[in-house]
């Protein structure tokens, strides 16, 4: 499973990149607004760090506006993927962008039928928002499982991004289900790595090594 980071923060992106685990980045208007920087410049800086897909979202609601914005965003770097909301206008824009070989990430997916339609329109990625479904007492990961079945039934190439991840169990389930990508907030990436027994183990090895050195009279 590929790992994307769900942030527009350069420090977090640099750190995750330095760990050697990063395959891409997803941003959205909310994440970019948190950074309080000129968004196009911020996206360019992100693309300079990460070679994999970097998602940038259009704001327009009508398809000609979406396509125009997408073409501008696509000029930032080769690895930009255009996030398009799942609406009628979004599908029309996706069809056009896909014909122009511009990568698209169809966002705010909350149902398997939405996922089926975006694939038919030529989406490169579909983002299933599992956490926001959990928030309204609907099992978010069931959506991923349903999309996975539908896409394998028809050998659909659109890649499934598990998005709106809140905790490590979402990532574990995503990997068990064979999702293509999980886009994960920095805090959850850190939680994936941490284990108290690893820390205890390191401390014990360190102490025992010191004891040996003390016994041998070494500093
Ligand atoms: C995905 O691409 C979105 O940016 C993100 O996962 C949304 O997550 P949220 O529900 O925590 O805002």
Image (cartoon, helix red, strand yellow):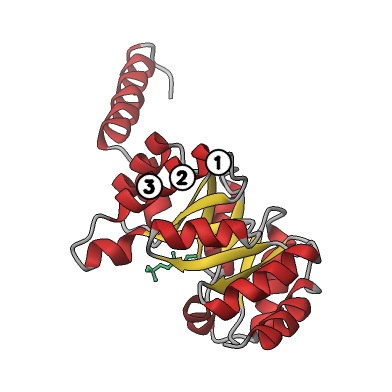
Instruction: Count residues near mark 2 (Cα–Cα under 10 Å), then give few for <14, some for 14-19, many for 20+.
Output: some
Residue at 73% across, 69% down: 97
Question: x and y percent of residue 87 in the render?
Answer: 51, 76
The CA distance from mark 2 to mark 1 is 7 Å
Residue at 57% across, 87% down: 61
Sequence-wise, the earlier of marks 3 and 1 is 3
Residue at 50% across, 53% down: 161
**Disc 3, SS:** helix
- Can residue 14 be seen here? The reply is no
Q: Are marks 2 and 3 in contact (CB under 8 Å)?
A: yes
Question: x and y percent of residue 215 in the render?
Answer: 32, 13
Q: Quadrant of ligand 1?
A: bottom left
Question: x and y percent of residue 144 in the render?
Answer: 39, 49
Instruction: Count residues near mark 3 (Cα–Cα under 10 Å), then give few for <14, some for 14-19, many for 20+.
Output: some
The residue wearing badge 2 is: 150
The CA distance from mark 3 to mark 1 is 13 Å
The residue wearing badge 1 is: 154
The CA distance from mark 2 to mark 3 is 6 Å
Q: Do the residues labelled 2 and 1 touch (CB within 8 Å)?
A: yes
**Disc 1, SS:** loop
- Check the image and report above or below for 196 versus 100: above
Label 3 or label 1, whichever lies nearer to me, is 1
**Along the line of sight, the residue nearer the viewer: 170 or 216:** 170
Instruction: Count residues near mark 1 (Cα–Cα under 10 Å), then give few for <14, some for 14-19, many for 20+.
Output: few
**Along the line of sight, the residue nearer the viewer: 113 or 84:** 113
The residue wearing badge 3 is: 146
Question: x and y percent of residue 14 in the render?
Answer: 60, 58
């Amino acid at each position: 499973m590929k790992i994307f980071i769900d942030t527009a923060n350069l420090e977090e992106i640099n750190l995750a990149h330095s760990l050697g685990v990063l395959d891409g980045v997803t941003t959205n208007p909310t994440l970019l607004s948190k950074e309080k920087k000129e968004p196009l410049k911020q996206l360019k800086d992100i693309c300079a760090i990460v070679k994999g897909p970097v998602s940038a979202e259009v704001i327009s609601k009508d398809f000609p506006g979406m396509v125009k914005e997408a073409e501008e965003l696509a000029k930032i770097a080769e690895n930009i993927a255009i996030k398009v909301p799942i609406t009628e206008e979004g599908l029309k824009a996706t069809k056009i962008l896909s014909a122009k070989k511009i990568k698209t990430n169809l966002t705010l997916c909350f149902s398997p039928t939405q996922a089926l339609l975006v694939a038919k329109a030529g989406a490169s990625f579909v983002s299933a928002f599992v956490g926001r479904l959990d928030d309204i007492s609907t099992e978010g990961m069931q959506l991923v499982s349903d999309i996975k079945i539908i896409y394998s039934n028809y050998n659909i190439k659109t890649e499934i991004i598990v998005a709106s991840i809140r905790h490590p169990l979402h990532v574990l389930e995503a990997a068990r289900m064979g999702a293509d990508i999980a886009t994960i907030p920095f805090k959850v990436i850190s939680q994936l790595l941490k284990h108290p027994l690893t820390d205890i183990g390191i401390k014990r090895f360190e102490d025992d090594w010191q004891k040996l050195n003390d016994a041998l009279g070494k500093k």
